[in-house]
Image (cartoon, helix red, strand yellow):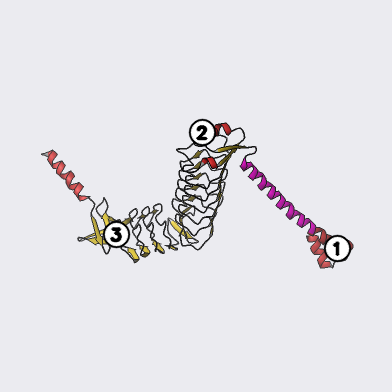
Amino acid sequence: MKKHALLFLGLLLAFAVQAIDFKVDQLKYTTNADGLTASVDSQECNLSGAIVIPAKVMYNGQSYAVTSIGDGAFRGCNEMTSIEISEGVRYVGMGAFIHCASLASVKIPMSVDSIGAGAFCFCSSLAHFDVDKDHPFFTVSDGILLSKNKRTIIAYPAAQAKNHYLIPVGIATIEENAFAGCSTLHYLTIPPGVIAINKCAFLGCSGLDSISISASVDSIGERAFWGCKNLTSLLIPEGVHTIGRSAFEGCENLVSVFIPGSVISIGGKAFGRCQKLKEIHIDASTPPAGDGDPFDSINKTTCTLYVPAFSKGDYAASEYWKEFLIVEEEVPFMTVVWVLGVIALLLGMIFVLSRRFKIGVLRSSPCKCGKMKDEESTNCINH
């Protein structure tokens, strides 16, 4: 009898917390495990215009507090133009508004403390984030959604009218999908201080022509630059240790790649389907480890691999590298780049100093012959 009572109680509790799906004012919801709150569920995408996510909804006589927007909830809802999230919602799910082509603005309340990866990616019309300046977790700077401490880029609005974006000094992390689908971005500078480029960070940035990556970057995540088809040349700086799977896959116009000696791991298909790749310069004496062929689906017999002196044998014996036309470089490519950079810097300094020296001579000569006015002589001495 006691066992039957416990079984009945267990079934009753299970029924009590069973999720309930319902629809109110065109929006679909599902109840959470506590039975008191609800999440915005996947929509049918027949929504249009300005949409408000309410703080509470009533269903069958019961009030539910809306606390979250589910992963992919509004995926592909192309007719929505704006989203206002009401106070009380705490979580915006991964890809919550992905591929909402007409979405132009998003209002994020003070209550939101977590935003999933790629929540606003591939929103080609997105131009504005509305976030209170006193928000405890997020802020907006130059139109970009950042963490409150301005150390992480959360989302870059795709409709920003910028050809060149210089990531602000102080940023350490570029979050997953932060720039995904920003096809209007052509030139990108990643400054010193940035440590990680997370996966899919620049996925599908098809207009990206040039990227400058700082030596502070330690890792380039999976699919970080997947499908950046306008890239023709890539210089990965010394300091990068890992290149993730499919990091540059589908960069179909990439012709040359320069990989530093610091790289110890390259993921499978990292440069897959880069059919125009003709030369690879790598400064690592030992072939980097990996979890598959980094150069999948390219013609290796027409691509030259330049390796450090005395390392040709190691590459020729390596499964994923041996099919290339392998050429040893007497001086590592990155060393050449470094030396040329130092020479350019020294020449610049010499040019500046020489100009200053010549100006000093011209100013001092009249002083010696006593032909300058008193005021001019004073200035000459001061210089």
Quadrant including the N terminus: top left
**Secondary structure at numbered mark 3:** loop
Residue position for label 2: 318
Mark 1 or 3, nearer chain start: 3
Q: Which residues are magenta?
A: 330-358
Mark 2, Cα crowd under 10 Å, few <14 / some 14-19 / many 20+, is: some
Residue position for label 1: 366
Quadrant including the C terminus: bottom right
Disc 3 marks which amino acid? Glu
Residue 211 forms part of the magenta stretch: no
**Secondary structure at numbered mark 1:** helix
Disc 2 marks which amino acid? Ser
Residue 347 forms part of the magenta stretch: yes
Residue position for label 3: 44
**Furthest residue toward right:** 369
Tell which of 16 and 334 is nearer to you: 334
